[in-house]
Amino acid sequence: MKKERRKFSAGFKAKVAIEAIREQHTVHELAAKYEIHPTQINTWKREFLDNAESVFSKEQSPSKDDSQEKKELYSKIGELQIQVDFLKKVLGK
């Protein structure tokens, strides 16, 4: 029977990576503490350092959720504008 893979949150990965960067404990000590393979800790540390510059970049790329939400809001604005125009005609203004 296969063993299911463990899934770690982004916060947990960042916490472990930061501890590895601090170098107050060896990677093997951290691996024993968090019950993770040392190679995994090194991978998270490398990814953390490689993507660190994105924290300070001025360009924020909108996520897919933001663009979808934006489309929905524009659609709603259009519907409301049509309703306002209709009510103006009906009321004779």
Image (cartoon, rainbow, N blue to C red):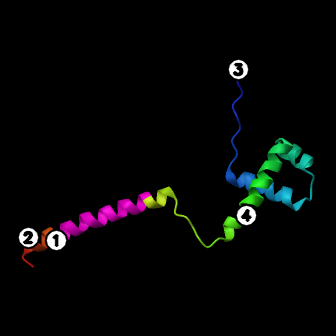
Q: Position of residue 37 (x, y in %)?
A: 83, 41
Q: Secondary structure at mark 1?
A: helix
Mark 2 residue type: Val
Q: Nearer the viewer, residue 19 or 46?
A: 46
Rounded to the nearest angstrom, the CA distance separating label 1 from label 4 is 50 Å
Q: Earlier in the sequence, mark 1 or mark 2?
A: 1
In the image, residue 29 sits, relative to residue 65, either above or below, namely above
Rounded to the nearest angstrom, the CA distance separating label 2 from label 3 is 70 Å
Q: Secondary structure at mark 3?
A: loop
In the picture, the disc for residue 85 is 1
Residue 67 sits inside the magenta stretch: no
Rendered residue at 75%/54% (across/down): 47
In the picture, the disc for residue 90 is 2
Residue 79 sits inside the magenta stretch: yes
Rounded to the nearest angstrom, the CA distance separating label 1 from label 2 is 9 Å
In the image, residue 9 sits, relative to residue 2, either above or below, namely below
Rounded to the nearest angstrom, the CA distance separating label 4 from label 2 is 58 Å
- Placement of the C terminus among the 4 image quadrants: bottom left
Q: Earlier in the sequence, mark 2 or mark 3?
A: 3
Mark 4 residue type: Ala
Q: Earlier in the sequence, mark 1 or mark 4?
A: 4
- Which residue bears the numbered disc 3? 1
- Which residue bears the numbered disc 4? 52
Q: Position of residue 75 (x, y in %)?
A: 31, 61
Closest to the camera, between mark 1 and mark 2, is 1
Q: Which residues are magenta?
A: 68-84
Rendered residue at 92%/48% (across/down): 29
